[in-house]
Image (tube, rainbow, N blue to C red):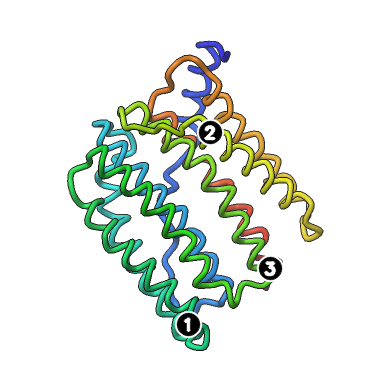
C-alpha cells in the first residue's frame, strides 16, 4: 500500500509538471491525409472519454481544470470534427455499406450523448454516457475498417493504450460519486490486462525506433499509477486522477506522432 508521503509527492509533481490535454489540434479535411483523418478519428474516441470525465468532475462539484468550461469548448469541437470525419469516410466508402452505416449509427449515439453532456450532470446521465461511448467506439472503428491497413492499425492500437487509464479513472470517479458499478472489480482487472497486452504488441512491432521504445516505456511507468490506485486502500482525490489520465493522453499522443511519421 503506497504511503501518504508518496501520495502527496505524486500529487505535487502532477500539479507542477503537466498541462491541459483535452484539446485536439484543428483539423482541415480538405488538406488532411488519410493518416491525419484516421488519427483524428482515433483521438475522437479518447476525447469522448475525456468529456465523460469532465462531466463526472462537474458532477462531483470539482472546479479543478475547469471541467464546465472545458466541456463547453469540447462539445462543439467534437461535434464539428465528428461531422468532418464522417463526411470524409462516407464520401469514400459508398461501396462499403456496413462501414457507411457504422458512421450513421455512431451519429445517432453522439446526438443523444451531446444532449446529456449539455444538461446538469447526474449519476444516471454519467452511466448512460459511459454506455453510449462504449458503443460508439466500435462503430467509429468499423467505419474506417475498409481503409485500415497495417500501418493505420498501429495508430488504432495506440488509442487503446490511451483509453485504458481513462476508463479506470472514470470508473473510480463514478465510485466516488456513488454511481452503481456492480462489475467494477472485474472491469478494472480486464482493462489492466488489455493495457499490458496492447503494450506488448506495440513493443514487438519492428517499426519501433529508440524514440518510440522510450515512449512506450514511459507509458508503462505511467500506468503503474493506475494499478497502484486500484490496489490501494486509501481514497484518491478526483483532481489527481483527472490530471494523471490527461498525462497519459499526452504520452500516447507522442507515441502516435512517432508512428505516424513512419507512415508518410
Which residue sits at x=52%, y=88%? 95
The residue indicated by pointer 3 is: 151
Badge 2 or badge 1: first in the primary sequence: 1
**Are the residues at dot 3 and dot 1 in contact (C-beta closer than 8 Å)?**
no
Mark-to-mark CA distance, 3 and 1: 23 Å
Q: Nearer the viewer, mark 3 or mark 2?
A: 2
Q: Does residue 199 appear left or right of residue 99 in this picture?
A: right
Q: Quadrant of the N terminus?
A: top right
The residue indicated by pointer 2 is: 186
Mark-to-mark CA distance, 3 and 2: 32 Å
Image x and y of residue 234, in percent = 46, 15
Image x and y of residue 45, in percent = 46, 57
Badge 3 or badge 2: first in the primary sequence: 3
Asked if 139 appears above or below 48 in the picture, the reply is below
Badge 3 or badge 1: first in the primary sequence: 1
Q: How dense is the environment of label 2, judged by Cα within 10 Å: few (below 14), some, or many (20 and up)?
A: few
**Are the residues at dot 3 and dot 2 in contact (C-beta closer than 8 Å)?**
no
Image x and y of residue 118, in percent = 21, 52
Determine the residue located farthest toward the bottom in the rendered image: 95
The residue indicated by pointer 1 is: 97
Q: How dense is the environment of label 1, judged by Cα within 10 Å: few (below 14), some, or many (20 and up)?
A: few
Task: Please tell me whether mark 1 sits on a helix, a strand or a loop.
Answer: helix
Amino acid at each position: 500500500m503506497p504511503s501518504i508521503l508518496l501520495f502527496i509527492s505524486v500529487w505535487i509533481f502532477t500539479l507542477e509538471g503537466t498541462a491541459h490535454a483535452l484539446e485536439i489540434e484543428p483539423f482541415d479535411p480538405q488538406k488532411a491525409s488519410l493518416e491525419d483523418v484516421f488519427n483524428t478519428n482515433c483521438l475522437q474516441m479518447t476525447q469522448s472519454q475525456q468529456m465523460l470525465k469532465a462531466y463526472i468532475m462537474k458532477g462531483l462539484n470539482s472546479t479543478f481544470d475547469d471541467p464546465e468550461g472545458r466541456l463547453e469548448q469540447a462539445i462543439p469541437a467534437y461535434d464539428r470534427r465528428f461531422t468532418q470525419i464522417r463526411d470524409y469516410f462516407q464520401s469514400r466508402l459508398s461501396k462499403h455499406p456496413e462501414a457507411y452505416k457504422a458512421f450513421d449509427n455512431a451519429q445517432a449515439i453522439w446526438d443523444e450523448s451531446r444532449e446529456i453532456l449539455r444538461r446538469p450532470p447526474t449519476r444516471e446521465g454519467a452511466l448512460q454516457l459511459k454506455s453510449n461511448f462504449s458503443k460508439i467506439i466500435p462503430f467509429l472503428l468499423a467505419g474506417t475498417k475498409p481503409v485500415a491497413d497495417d500501418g493505420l492499425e498501429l495508430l488504432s492500437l495506440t488509442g487503446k493504450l490511451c483509453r485504458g487509464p481513462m476508463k479506470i479513472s472514470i470508473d473510480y470517479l463514478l465510485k466516488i460519486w456513488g454511481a452503481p458499478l456492480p462489475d467494477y472489480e472485474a472491469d478494472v482487472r480486464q482493462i489492466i490486462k488489455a493495457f499490458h497486452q496492447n503494450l506488448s504488441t506495440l513493443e514487438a512491432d519492428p517499426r519501433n525506433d529508440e524514440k518510440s521504445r522510450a515512449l512506450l516505456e514511459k507509458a508503462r511507468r505511467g500506468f503503474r499509477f493506475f494499478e497502484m490506485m486500484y490496489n490501494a486502500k486509501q481514497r484518491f482525490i478526483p483532481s489527481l486522477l483527472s490530471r494523471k489520465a490527461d498525462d497519459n493522453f499526452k504520452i500516447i499522443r507522442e507515441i502516435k506522432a512517432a508512428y505516424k511519421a513512419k507512415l508518410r
